[in-house]
Image (cartoon, helix red, strand yellow):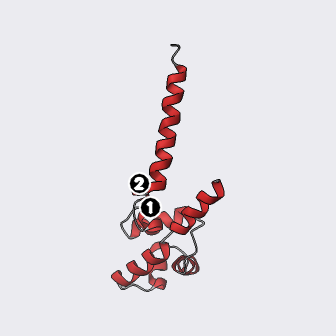
Amino acid sequence: MKEEKITDIANEIKIREVIKAKVYELRIPLKELSRRTRIPYSTLFSWSEGRPPKDLVKAKRLAEYFQMSLDELLFGKSTRNSEYFKACISREMKKQVESFINSLDI
C-alpha cells in the first residue's frame, strides 16, 4: 500500500514542465540559470528531463528564484489542494481526535 502511494506521488511530479515553462517565460538558458542559482547545470538538466530532485535544498533554491513554493515547483500546483494531501490530513486528524478521546478518562 505504501509503495502505491509513493508511486502515485512520483507520477505527480511536474518539475520538468515547470522548469521548461519558466525558462521559456524568463528567456534564460539553463547555463545562465545554473550560474544565477548556484545549482550545477547537470542537476538542472536532469530535472528538466523529468528526473525528481534528490537534493531538496537545491530544489527550494530554484523555487525561490522562480518566486514559487516548492510544491508549485515539484507538482505544478500546491499539493494542499490534492486529494492525496487531503486524505492524509483527514487520517492524521482522525488519529489525533481518537487519541484525545482515549486520553479522557470518561
Horizontal and vertical percent for residue 59?
A: 50, 66
| Three-letter residue code for mark 2 | Arg
Residues 42 and 50: in front is: 50
**Quadrant position of residue 54:** bottom right
- Classify residue 28 as left or right of residue 43: left
Other residues around mark 2 within 10 Å, as few (<14) / some (14–19) / many (≥20): few
**Residue tagged by mark 1?**
71
The location of residue 70, given as percent across then percent down, is: 45, 62
Instruction: Depth check: give the residue in front, 5 or 62.
Output: 5
Q: Residue at x 58, y 80 (%)?
A: 42
At label 1, counting other C-alpha atoms closer than 10 Å, the crowd grade (few under 14, some 14-19, many 20 or more) is some
Instruction: Determine contact: label 2, label 1, CB under 8 Å.
Output: yes
Query: Picture quarter containing residue 46?
Result: bottom right
The mark found on residue 80 in the picture is 2
SS of the residue under disc 2: helix
| The N terminus, quarter of image | bottom right
- The secondary element bearing badge 1 is classed as helix
